[in-house]
Amino acid sequence: GAGVSQSPSNKVTEKGKDVELRCDPISGHTALYWYRQSLGQGLEFLIYFQGNSAPDKSGLPSDRFSAERTGGSVSTLTIQRTQQEDSAVYLCASSSLGGGAYEQYFGPGTRLTVT
Amino acid sequence: ILNVEQSPQSLHVQEGDSTNFTCSFPSSNFYALHWYRWETAKSPEALFVMTLNGDEKKKGRISATLNTKEGYSYLYIKGSQPEDSATYLCAFASGGSYIPTFGRGTSLIVHP
């Protein structure tokens, strides 16, 4: 079956511009996570959606970052006024249920480069 | 901030060697421990999720053990093959948390 998809796969943007990254989770998966991996760093949690509950935004690094999930499915991560330190690979993952005991299925990621 | 440590950071082995690496995590308030394999240019792929002390999981030549009382998990690869070359990530979820914390990974390179 279809896995998690993300678009675009690569994005180069100028400092100060806004970007939108998209994630299509596996159909029926109620939990969705956004992570990023900066050069030389581990996976950094950004935001978590579970069903109709309010998202956990505790990992968002600044108020320039926001995300939404429409209809319990597709999610969009928006970064406003991008900075060079936002350059990273942004990964989306979904799991069948929320809670830390369910394996996550990852998308291929979006490589963001801010020039 | 939960401290999840993986060692070694990187490992080079010859084809056919067996190898293992470690994930250390807090020994209190354990909920689940995940292992993922992340090959270059691909997405991380789940290997195991373990929830009980003493759990042992196996998938082909790869196996994992879990000791929640002392806060560590081992991942073993028997008879390494070049296609096992990848970064192996562990992730720890504490009780009541739905957001696993990832370690930085162990990079494994298997030389033919």
Image (cartoon, coloured by chain):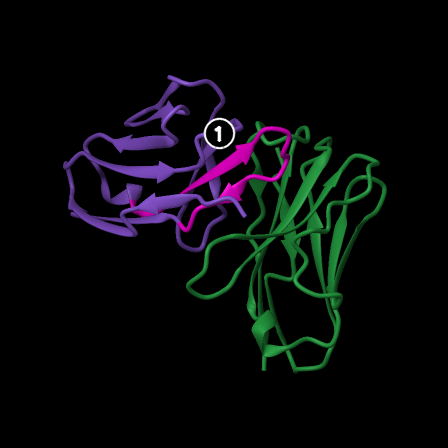
Residue B88 makes an appearance in the image:
no
Count of numbered circles on the image: 1
Give the residue at x 26% y 32%.
B77
Give the residue at x 81% y 39%.
A72
Q: Nearer the viewer, residue B34 or B112?
A: B34
**Taking A109 as reference, is B52 left or right?**
left
Query: Could you say whether the residue bearing mark 1 is in a helix, strand or loop?
Result: loop
Where is residue A52 shown, x and y percent of the image?
84, 36
Residue A36 makes an appearance in the image:
yes
Name the tint of chain B in the rendering: purple
Q: Which chain's residue wears label 1?
A: B
Give the residue at x 76% y 47%.
A74
**As drawn, B96 above or below A15:** above
Where is residue A95 shown, x and y percent of the image?
63, 34
Where is residue A63 shown, x and y percent of the image?
75, 65
Which image quadrant for residue B27? top left
Name the tint of chain A in the rendering: green
The residue under label 1 is: B28
**As drawn, A24 above or below A29:** below
Where is residue B46 shown, x and y percent of the image?
48, 35
The verdict on residue B12 being magenta is: no
Q: Which residues are magenta?
A: B85-104
